Image (tube, coloured by chain):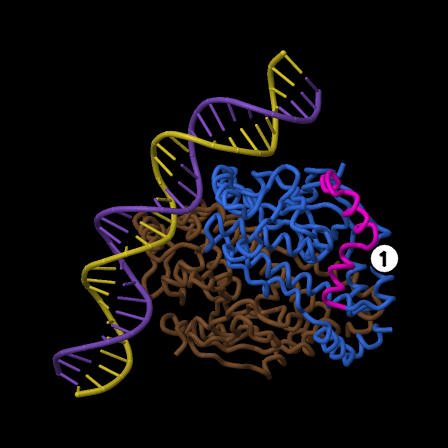
Chain colours: A brown, B blue, C yellow, D purple
Amino acid sequence: MLVLQMQDGEIQDEILEMTHALKRKLSVFLSMSDSEERFIDRLDARTESFGKNDQIVSEGDAYSKIYVIKKGWTYHSRTLDDGRRQITRIDLPGDICCFFAPILKYSANNIVALTDCEMTVLELEQLAEIYTEQPGLGAALSWCCAQDESVLSERLVSVGRRSAVERLAHFFVEIRRRMELVDLAEGNRFLLPVTREQLADAMGITTVHLFRSMRRLEKDQIIAWGTDGVAINDMMELHRIAKFTEPYLHYTEIPSRTDRFLKKLSQIPQYASGQQ
Amino acid sequence: MLVLQMQDGEIQDEILEMTHALKRKLSVFLSMSDSEERFIDRLDARTESFGKNDQIVSEGDAYSKIYVIKKGWTYHSRTLDDGRRQITRIDLPGDICCFFAPILKYSANNIVALTDCEMTVLELEQLAEIYTEQPGLGAALSWCCAQDESVLSERLVSVGRRSAVERLAHFFVEIRRRMELVDLAEGNRFLLPVTREQLADAMGITTVHLFRSMRRLEKDQIIAWGTDGVAINDMMELHRIAKFTEPYLHYTEIPSRTDRFLKKLSQIPQYASGQQ
DNA sequence: CGAACGGTTGACACGGGTCAAGTCCGGTGG
DNA sequence: CCACCGGACTTGACCCGTGTCAACCGTTCG
């Protein structure tokens, strides 16, 4: 059973069934045409499922397919030979798991399912098709990719320069915003299917210290994290502690910008022909 | 005067003049045809220069152009409002400074010149042209982008899970490998145009602790870093300390892979026509 | 000739790691 | 039905790596 369904399951499920999370995400960047919507719907023809804790890709594996998460959560990690592990990335519905798979030969990371997952599979052919036949969608995918890099970069800022409490605060605000974007959270509660150890590995601290730091946030009634989900009680304060500044998420890339992008693309003969 | 020219200047200069560093870098991924080589040469028509410590892009600035470094070094940083700063990335000749500039509206980072710099400027038009008319080069650029993300990800592993000494060791091995790739280093010495403070900000430690940690490495005769450059005296040991594993650099993406990529692309009508 | 900046080091304080001991819960086998 | 087990969760005590503060040197530049 999908962890996400354990609670508030009906609501979240319903929304997820309604539209592919990817569609919701891309629609922030791009007001999609009917043909674009249909294009995305057709991608669902090829899906793959994974169970909780399944290793989707291992370090050193040959790469090939791109996975877009329809349902469930995953993480990417690297492990040093003495066992220290860093989680470099946590993905949720709508996120693209390994955008560069078609270009890279081997994976340098592990990719693991945090919950039962359903993924849309893209091979190189489909990707090329998107970029040539649906340049709008192509631009939107590039936007996702740019965003991912920016999120990664901000995580580096966290781990490099924020204290444990600040990092946690930042993480919760970020994950909350990202869930909101694909309609996985409203109100002040949401589910977070990661263990304490996984979160510690993502934050670059030990579990012991994770508990200490969470206590600090819980004591002040800012946040609560049980087994049944997270509740953010004082979002303003959490923002303040995290020194959270939203621009790095690049959620305000307005369509006019995209239009300009598409207009320029259409001046290139190949794209002009491919555009309809 | 370019810092890189201060020492061994003649040699490095000569090589740099010979070929655009980007060309050397891409040739690792792709054996370039004459038309591809000429295409890159023509990009040099549009260049821009910056002086040491010039702010190339500031947090919040509108993005537009892509800069490819011809000569010089740059870094990307984020500063929290209380002054803490994290350098997220250090770029050298052949690196692409802000690949996603045409897609993103605003920059979330500062980009600063570490030395006097000469950059090749790419606007959206050229980029689209590359992807449509020279899919081989397009794939190679995507490879650069994939690599950048992987390097960023490994830096997160460093800052999250490696000790200060290990981080430093890892940084030196990485930067050495990257310089080698574009012929900026041979033998065991190379120039590193960063201040102690900048390196500390890149490693996520304080300058004071940087000194402490460097002392450890210098005491054991593993490395030396004066004002005139870095000397790696015991590369094996440095590797060992860093727990350096090369795959994340993705330097072994063999051409056969690229050929497969191009073959598939050529099955898409638009690309087939664009491929000449 | 002083100011500003990069480099360098010592002394001390504190955040976060390590070790160790438990609790709680769900699953499994007798 | 209970006993046992493993895995996730939780906390206290202690210690070490890293941050903080402060001082100083050498160079460059106005």
The percent position of residue A211, horizontal first and vertical second, equals 32, 55
Tell me if mark 1 has few (under 14), some (14-19) or many (20+) residues whose alpha carbon lies within 10 angstroms of its own.
Answer: few
In the drawing, does residue B262 fall left or right of residue C25? right
**Front one among A250 and B143:** B143
Place of residue A63 in the rendered image (x, y in percent of width and height, measured from the top left): 60, 74
Q: Indicate the chain on which mark 1 is placed.
A: B
Q: Nearer the viewer, residue A149 or A204?
A: A204
Q: Give the range drawn in magenta.
A: B3-30
Is residue A180 in view from this perspective?
no
Q: Which amino acid does label 1 sit on?
A: Asp
> Can residue B26 be seen at all in this image of the molecule?
yes
Q: Is residue B29 magenta?
A: yes
Dot 1: element? helix
Q: Mark 1 points at which residue?
A: B41
Q: Quadrant of residue B40?
A: bottom right
Main SS, magenta residues: helix
Q: Quadrant of the C terminus of chain B?
A: bottom right
